């Protein structure tokens, strides 16, 4: 019998839990990625804002903090084709365990090159059409990005519970991860009970001590309720006008930056962090405080344990279920 998909995913990624930190540009920096990896989950560096030289430095810095595997996220749209090509060269040379791509349908060569270099490739999509393209192009792992998700969305029009089964039907033997609003153990259980091999988490990791987000950004996530995020298609820092994204809008009427989506980093000036609309998903209502990344991983992974049909007296076919929730 083939091992369950989550088990293969954990083996391939070299992790204990099928929990992945989203590569969030500027926010998923070496300290956060390493903390997530050390806690048994898989961290992805957010490469999109980085000059190629800085990307190399971030990869080296992460390796200086952990011996565990990690990935790098790239988005061609952000800096344009030349920057993307140079960033990809760095990634291929450095060979982290995984390349994560988003908005990269026009760059199938990136998938081919990374796979030739022996890396895994993960592609995030929000429709069945994009999933088919990613699978045809050779993606090893697919991420179903539900409309609940924070940050940029492609295109963010389908909720996770509708998207998951549609993409499961396409993914076959390839692991499918769930993204969008995943905040605690209950969400992980729900996504995996629906067939996901694991989860990708962004917003809940922004609100950790190790994240590279500005304190103002972290605090707004903690204070926000489930009604507070907005789906927008206007301006967002560095992206083509109109690219959909989900933010905590800025309510300050007298500043023009309030129309701009952004992910304020520690290095950004407080007045910028205070004025921007900040990327966040609909899970914000259940992020009640800051904690360490390790605690966040422990919370998400709580209750995950391999199913033991003999011990529980459950029917043997339940052994196919990725994990059984709680004792
Ligand atoms: C602050 C922030 C920045 C993000 N930046 C990126 C990015 O650079 N690349 C990417 O592929 N996805 C990015 N995303 C989207 C994530 O990949 C993922 O779809 C999303 O975080 C999942 O939803 P959640 O935030 O509700 O957990 C970002 C999300 C957030 C919240």
Image (cartoon, rainbow, N blue to C red):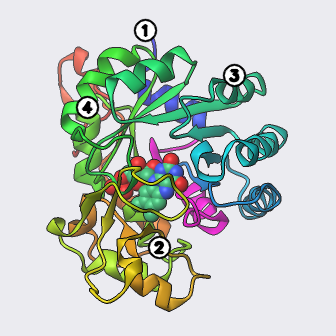
The answer to whether one can see residue 59 in this image is yes
Which mark is in front, 3 or 1?
A: 3
Element on which disc 3 rests: helix
Which mark is in front, 4 or 2?
A: 4
Question: Badge 3: few (under 14), some or many (20 or more) residues near its Cα, within 10 Å?
Answer: some
> In terms of image quarters, where does ligand 1 lie?
bottom left
Q: Is residue 23 magenta?
A: yes
Residues in magenta?
A: 15-41
Cβ at disc 3 under 8 Å from ligand 1: no
On the image, which quarter does residue 216 sit in? bottom left
Question: Badge 4: few (under 14), some or many (20 or more) residues near its Cα, within 10 Å?
Answer: many
Residue at which label 1 appears:
1
Q: Earlier in the sequence, mark 4 or mark 1?
A: 1
Give the Cα separation between the discs numbered 2 and 1: 38 Å
Which mark is in front, 4 or 1?
A: 4
On the image, which quarter does residue 231 sit in? bottom left
Q: Are marks 2 and 3 in contact (CB under 8 Å)?
A: no
Q: Residue at x 43, y 8 (%)?
A: 1
Give the Cα separation between the discs numbered 4 and 1: 28 Å
Image quadrant holding the C terminus, namely top left
Q: Is residue 92 above or below residue 153?
A: above
Residue 163 circle label: 4
Q: Residue at x 45, y 73 (%)?
A: 208
* Camera-side residue of 35 and 91: 91
Residue at which label 2 appears:
292
Q: Are marks 4 and 2 in contact (CB under 8 Å)?
A: no
* Camera-side residue of 292 and 205: 205
């Amino acid at each position: 019998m083939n091992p369950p998909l989550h088990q293969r995913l954990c083996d391939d990624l070299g992790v204990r839990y099928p929990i992945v930190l989203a590569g969030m540009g500027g926010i998923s920096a070496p300290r956060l990625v390493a903390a997530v990896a050390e806690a048994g989950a898989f961290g992805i560096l957010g490469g999109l804002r980085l000059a190629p030289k800085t990307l190399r430095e971030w990869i080296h810095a992460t390796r200086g903090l952990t011996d565990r595997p990690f990935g790098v996220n790239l988005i061609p749209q952000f800096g344009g084709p030349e920057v993307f090509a140079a960033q990809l060269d760095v990634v291929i040379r450095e060979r982290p365990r995984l390349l994560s791509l988003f908005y990269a349908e026009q760059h199938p060569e990136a998938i081919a090159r990374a796979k030739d270099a022996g890396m895994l490739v993960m592609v995030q999509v929000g429709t069945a059409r994009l999933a088919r393209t990613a699978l045809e192009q050779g993606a090893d792992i697919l991420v179903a990005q539900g409309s609940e998700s924070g940050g940029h969305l492609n295109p963010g029009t389908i909720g996770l519970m509708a998207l998951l089964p549609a993409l499961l039907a396409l993914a076959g033997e390839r692991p499918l991860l769930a993204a969008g609003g995943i905040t605690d153990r209950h969400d992980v259980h729900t996504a995996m009970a629906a067939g996901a091999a694991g989860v990708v988490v962004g917003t809940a990791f922004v609100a950790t001590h190790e994240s590279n987000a500005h304190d103002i950004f972290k605090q707004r996530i903690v204070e926000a309720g489930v009604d507070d995020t907005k789906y927008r298609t206007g301006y967002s820092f560095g992206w083509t006008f109109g690219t959909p994204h989900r933010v905590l809008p800025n309510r300050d009427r007298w500043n023009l930056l309030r129309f701009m989506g952004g992910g304020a980093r520690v290095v950004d000036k407080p007045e910028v962090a205070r004025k921007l609309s900040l990327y966040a998903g609909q899970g914000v209502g259940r992020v009640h405080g800051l904690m360490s990344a390790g605690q966040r991983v422990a919370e998400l992974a709580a209750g995950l344990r391999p199913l033991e049909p003999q011990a529980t007296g459950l029917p043997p076919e339940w052994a196919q279920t990725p994990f059984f929730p709680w004792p």
